[in-house]
Image (tube, coloured by chain):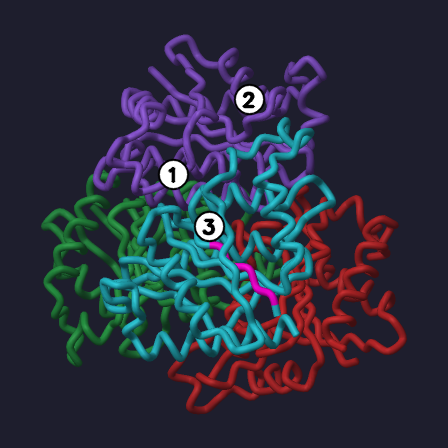
Chain colours: A purple, B cyan, C green, D red
Amino acid sequence: MNIVAISGSLRKGSHNAMLIHVLQELAPAEMKIQELNIGNLPLYNTDDEAAFPAEAKALKDAIEASDGVIIATPEYNRSFPGVLKNAIDWASRPWGKNSFAKKPALIMGVSIGKIGTAVAQSHLKEVLLYLDMRVIGQPELYLGPASGIFDEAGNLTDSAVRELLAKALAALASSAA
Amino acid sequence: MNIVAISGSLRKGSHNAMLIHVLQELAPAEMKIQELNIGNLPLYNTDDEAAFPAEAKALKDAIEASDGVIIATPEYNRSFPGVLKNAIDWASRPWGKNSFAKKPALIMGVSIGKIGTAVAQSHLKEVLLYLDMRVIGQPELYLGPASGIFDEAGNLTDSAVRELLAKALAALASSAA
Amino acid sequence: MNIVAISGSLRKGSHNAMLIHVLQELAPAEMKIQELNIGNLPLYNTDDEAAFPAEAKALKDAIEASDGVIIATPEYNRSFPGVLKNAIDWASRPWGKNSFAKKPALIMGVSIGKIGTAVAQSHLKEVLLYLDMRVIGQPELYLGPASGIFDEAGNLTDSAVRELLAKALAALASSAA
Amino acid sequence: MNIVAISGSLRKGSHNAMLIHVLQELAPAEMKIQELNIGNLPLYNTDDEAAFPAEAKALKDAIEASDGVIIATPEYNRSFPGVLKNAIDWASRPWGKNSFAKKPALIMGVSIGKIGTAVAQSHLKEVLLYLDMRVIGQPELYLGPASGIFDEAGNLTDSAVRELLAKALAALASSAA
């Protein structure tokens, strides 16, 4: 089972990238989780589809070859980052060639505040339903504050979160099977 | 009255850029509408705030010097474009230096479909409320299909839309006064 | 295949109730669509759960006995009706006894305007994901204006809508199988 | 300054009703906060507008006579309660007689969980913008868990929340002036 994962944050030491690394450790034996890069994409412009950018094509190919998609997103200004939406906009194009269609989607997010990206995820899940993904509704993963979840080395220190992540990966495996 | 306007689409011949041009013609004498460029921004990365990009600084300066903001947005995948969110993410930063605070916001959008960007605008208005803008709720401007609103030269051909736009500019002028 | 359907509008001659009747005609041979009543429920009050109202219990029983749920909703004030949310709130209770869990959900709506309940459905789909339903993302069914879809006797007069509804029922049948 | 307040929960001992009582104590001298009842309304039905229910008329009259509206809402199933939406649906009617137009709106909510009704409020704010209210974006009031905010007698025990509420009332007073 080949899963791809996207972090909505580009910064080094991103809590959401940390979360993906934790998932890679927690994944059951039959599941491989590959992190995709979205920091090398140009800003989406319809005019540029004629010469479709190689980076966007590579993103599409990886998603299409996968059995499911994990997105770990921060919340910026009560929605998900423009960087992440830009990647989704590219991968949904050109018209009729949406790379996400029919894939299971597991969404999560960690933030420094207690809301744990709940509002960002509500927008993101709407977008992914439109893209015809099989969006997993439960368990929800609104993780925060980050300071109580990771230590400074990026290790997960909250055992309840660890159990929740394992449960989420099982839901993804079931949906992707 | 100095208003800045942002189109959420970067393509040449964008209907939303056309809409801004129409607004520039319709604006009352005391209102000047200046279109801002968001196509030259890098992808937002918190790590890059230390050397804040000049293009993002210029965007912030223009917004801060204004009396109000117009955003004309397409709907991509049932939300507003990543390109537009990326610009908002930059202009909201660094922490405590949100350039949008207390400004009136007039939101509109035109699409090729009949929904006229209604769902995209619902997400966008939430973000702008968080950024402490005075978001104008009425009139709503869900414009579409575009083919019935503009001719091929980009002239507005729908007189009901013209009246709605004039009403919206009056609401903005009142809020910005 | 036993499907239950809920109209979000209580008025006689509701376009959304009409839509459910059309679905009953269009349903494939193996699918039976039963319309549920939500107009007899009390306003939800946690204190009343101790003596759970018989009408709410009947609603829960019908949903639990079903293989999938159709909701046809109007848009009131850019969300779905309070009447519909009240029914969902009852059927989600008591804690741990959510009647919607794991059921496929097909959402649609018809309105007198052209937006066709798109914003209402975006809120509704979020709620149903939380309730662990398998929400069908495509096809979307944003139907309007109603005057172009039904004649005065409630017959469906738009053949493109008929095809879309058939496609949606096929997606539901596939998800419920 | 005459402010009306609505709690989205009908249960006795509701945390959101408690919150309104705290606001009544904290209100500046010139502000009077009157709590409105929404538990006596029938389920909204367009057919019943012809003989508009007295309870709905009383709700409309109180809102129209006010200088601003406070809503304190729980989050049920990741949106605001049907009970509250039902009250809003009534007060927005009949067509052209929306009682909320132009009023300032201060939204808050307390829940037993840490998210503090953030998603419910995002839906609610969209609805109130549509109803042409002047929705206050900052400060946000996502209060929870309730157990850390109130003691068993309903007294506010969190001084940071007290300061936030005072700041919010000042924003409302400024908007209503």
Locate the C terminus of chain D by quadrant. bottom right
Residue D5 figure quarter: bottom right
Q: Which mark is residue A17?
A: 2
Task: Read off the magenta span.
Answer: B2-6
> Which one is earlier in the sequence, the residue at label 2 or at label 1?
2
Name the kind of residue labelled 3 in the image: Val
Residue C27, position in %: x, y? Answer: 14, 54
Residue of label 3: C127
Residue C117 figure quarter: bottom left
Q: Main secondary structure of the magenta part?
A: strand
In the image, A7: left or right of C128? right
Q: Secondary structure at mark 2?
A: helix
Q: Which mark is residue B29?
A: none
Residue A32, position in %: x, y? Answer: 40, 12
Which of discs 3 and 1 lies nearer the camera? The answer is 1
Residue of label 1: A44
- Give how far apart the Cα atoms at labels 2 and 1 are: 23 Å
Which of these two is toward me, A32 or B83? Answer: B83
Residue at image coords 29%, 50% = C106
